[in-house]
Amino acid sequence: MSGLPEAPASPGALAGQIEKSWREALSGEISSPRFAALERFVDAAYSRGGGAPAVFPPREKLFEAFKRTPFDKTKVVILGQDPYHEPGQAQGLAFYVPPSVKPPPSLANIAKEYGRMPDLLAWADGGVLLLNAILTVESGKALSHKGRGWEEFTDAAIAALAEKRENVVFILWGGAARRKGAAIDRSRHCVIESAHPSPLSAYRGFFGSDPFGKARTYLSAHGIEPPF
């Protein structure tokens, strides 16, 4: 958490950025004291001046994953760790960078496994929630906003899908993602696990794991049109 004292919560500007169906699904979390503390941390992080490191993604893109993939439209969840931390990369969607930016190694490896560079914006618009566990990061400092409250918020998002929806595919790459999805009911949803696509682990179980084919098969078997 942020280290700031907890106080009675009232949803503020941060909550107002969240897409309506997600705001309703997460109403309990959003009204909690810990979300109020997270909002104070986020406000402070984005408002610092005097040469302080930039924070990514741009604030208006903070909840882009929720905006593009509403709660009731989510078919697949792909879980990342935290945003890319170099300028111009992070846009609020796990693994996505703009076309003008060179694909980072993990995205390049996802493209290899998929067979071509995926259109992640089309995926997101079609029902793939590209969710990072942590939604902000300082420039050049991976995991710099770990433990500030985002993990609990994204835990709540995963729990809401797991509890209130049926037949969602959760694609969990790497140990951190697997731990975050450990409580998902496998009898109600499809959970696909493998090594992470990063260069350090892609050859230890990511390549050849066929997550996209497995997701298509599961969704089709349940009468859901696959988004990729």
Image (spheres, rainbow, N blue to C red):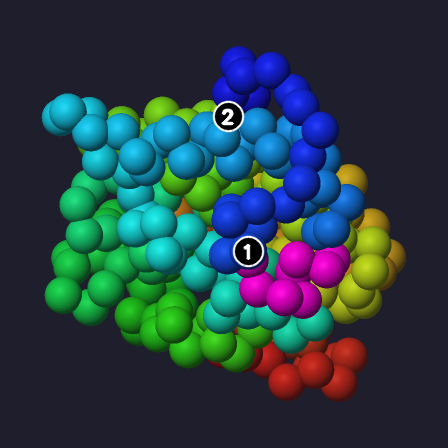
Please, what is the three-letter code of the amino acid marked with disc 2? Answer: Arg
What type is the residue that disc 1 sits on?
A: Gly
> Front-most of 49 and 195?
49
Q: Which residue is label 1 attached to?
A: 16
Vertical position of residue 128 compared to residue 103: above or below = below
* Residue 221 horizontal/vertical position (percent): 75, 80
| Quadrant the N terminus occupies | top right
Q: Which residue is mark 2?
A: 148
Image point (67%, 66%), residue name: 21
Residue 163 image point, x, y percent: 83, 54
* Residue 128 shows in this picture: no
Instruction: Kindly indicate the quadrant of the structure image that contains residue 49.
Output: top left
User: In this rendering, is residue 70 above or below 152?
Assistant: below
Residue at image location 57% in from the left, 50% down from the top: 15
Magenta: main secondary structure: helix
Q: Is residue 163 magenta?
A: no
Work out which residue is located at the far right of the displayed protein and give it.
187
Question: In the figure, 135 relative to 61: above or below?
Answer: above
Number of labelled discs?
Answer: 2
Q: Is residue 119 above or below residue 113?
A: below
**Mark nearer the N terminus (1 vs 2):** 1
Q: How far across and down, in percent of the image, does residue 123 sit?
A: 46, 73
